[in-house]
Image (cartoon, rainbow, N blue to C red):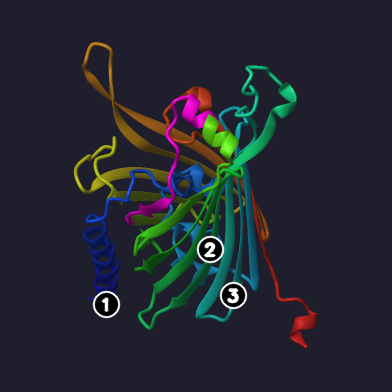
């Protein structure tokens, strides 16, 4: 019953935040959506069905309660991926430190950016002359910094954790925003076969304060070209509740296994084009499967992003996004690969994603 109480608590907190936030008019749909892409090729290969099964450093993103499964004194994880033919770049690094057998700390950083964007606002002067030397380059970048803590509870198999995150977004020198928010998660391992997880992202809603800095020349260009001058303001990211269930069984006695997880993403910013679309909550299911071979190789596949697409004749059809992946394990070093899409169901935009993860023992000098 204690497990149920903990899970219900997290869900109630998220729903309470939803109720309060829906009275606001500063909550655009898909706010801070770069934080929904995912980290780690092992998770991406399983269509992000990872809230219940994640262990160690990548739990900072997927479920901070998983930090209690940090295998050694320090775990390090990194990932680089590129989308839209290399136009957009996504980078992640995370570190998890095992404090003791009961608790762990984690820090991470995510950067999602498009670099070298031409700024042509000053290309044509007031007399109509074109001066290509006036073209400059800028970046549109989103950053997320996480500080995480997790602890095992008295009930065997139950862990809870949380994130404090800082969001920084920039659009060249024209605009920037700072924001902050909280995530909360729990994991429960009923036995060696069944695991359950709940993750509430932006549990108290995440606020971003935008400040725009346009010089007079740029303002004049905006006015002459019929563009609206942006105003400073607040942006609110509503909570997202993710429920996960994993089942895992050995196959034979040589370290082989099969594991499968089903996650349900409950978004709260209104109707979305997902399998179950309603207001204010839409539900997006995704399923992942992993086959382990002799503890050295993992083969993964998953399906997600189920959407109804309207045909030219007005009829609708259900589409889905398949993903595949592969993992290699050499002692404490893991190399993972995924063939995945950013989420638009277009095979032309699938990307190759690699990530690494390794664990380190406590330094010898630190033992003295």
Tag 2, which secondary structure?
strand
Q: Could you tell whether 218 is left or right of 64 in the image?
A: right
Give the position of the C terminus as an image quadrant: bottom right
Q: Is residue 232 magenta?
A: yes
Tell me the distance, in whole angstroms, between the alpha carbons under discs 2 and 3: 16 Å
Whether 108 is drawn above or below 5: the answer is above
Q: Position of residue 286 (x, y in %)?
A: 35, 43
Q: Which mark is residue 98?
A: 3
- Name the residue at 60% across, 27% down: 85
Which residue is labeled 2 in the image?
146
In the rendered picture of this protein, how many numbered marks are placed on residues?
3
The magenta stretch is 221-240
User: Element at badge 1?
Assistant: helix
- Residue 38 lies, in percent from the top left, at 49, 48
Q: Which residue is drawn at the image coordinates 28% and 62% (left, top)?
A: 14
Residue topped by disc 1: 2
Specify few, some or many for label 2: CA neighbours under 10 Å numbering under 14, 14-19, or 20 or more.
Answer: many
Q: Could you tell me if residue 292 is visible in this image?
A: no
Distance, label 1 to label 3, CA atoms, is: 25 Å
- As helix, strand or loop, the secondary structure at mark 3 comes to strand
Give the side of residue 363 with respect to residue 295, left or right: right
- Nearest to the observer: residue 17 or residue 304: 17
Position of residue 293 measured from the top left corner of the image (x, y, whole percent): 56, 48
Give me the residue at 48% from left, 36% from top. Answer: 342
The residue mark sitting in front, 2 or 1, is 2
Q: Quadrant of the N terminus?
A: bottom left
Q: Which mark is in front, 2 or 3?
A: 2
């Amino acid at each position: 019953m204690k497990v149920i109480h903990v899970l219900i608590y997290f869900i109630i907190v998220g729903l309470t935040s939803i109720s309060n936030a829906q009275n606001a008019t500063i909550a655009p749909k898909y706010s801070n959506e770069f934080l929904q892409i995912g980290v780690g090729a092992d998770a991406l290969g399983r269509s992000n069905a990872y809230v219940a099964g994640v262990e160690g450093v990548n739990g900072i993103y997927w479920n901070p309660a998983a930090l209690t499964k940090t295998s050694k004194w320090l775990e390090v994880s990194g990932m680089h991926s590129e989308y839209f033919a290399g136009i957009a770049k996504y980078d992640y690094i995370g570190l998890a430190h095992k404090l003791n057998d009961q608790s762990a700390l984690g820090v991470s950083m995510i950067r999602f950016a498009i670099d070298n964007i031409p700024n042509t606002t000053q290309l044509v002067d007031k007399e109509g002359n074109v001066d290509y030397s006036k073209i400059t380059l800028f970046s549109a970048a989103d950053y997320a910094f996480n500080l995480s803590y997790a602890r095992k509870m008295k009930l065997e198999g139950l862990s809870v954790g949380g994130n404090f995150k800082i969001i920084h977004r920039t659009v060249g020198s024209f605009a920037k925003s700072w924001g902050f928010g909280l995530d909360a998660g729990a994991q429960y391992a009923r036995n060696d076969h069944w695991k359950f997880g709940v993750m509430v992202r932006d549990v108290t809603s995440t606020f971003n304060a935008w400040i725009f800095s346009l010089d007079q020349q740029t303002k004049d260009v905006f006015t002459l070209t019929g563009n609206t001058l942006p105003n400073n303001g607040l942006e609110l990211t509503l909570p997202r509740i993710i429920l996960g269930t994993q089942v895992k069984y050995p196959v034979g006695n040589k370290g082989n296994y099969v594991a499968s997880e089903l996650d349900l993403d409950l978004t709260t910013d209104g109707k979305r084009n997902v399998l179950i679309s309603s207001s204010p909550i839409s539900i997006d299911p995704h399923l992942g499967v992993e086959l382990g071979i002799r503890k050295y190789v993992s083969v993964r596949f998953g399906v997600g992003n189920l959407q109804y697409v309207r045909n030219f004749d007005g009829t609708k059809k259900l589409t889905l996004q398949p993903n595949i992946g592969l993992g290699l394990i050499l002692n404490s070093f893991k190399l993972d690969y995924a063939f995945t899409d950013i989420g638009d169901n277009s095979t032309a935009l699938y990307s190759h994603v690699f990530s690494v993860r390794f664990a380190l023992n406590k330094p010898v000098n630190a033992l003295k």
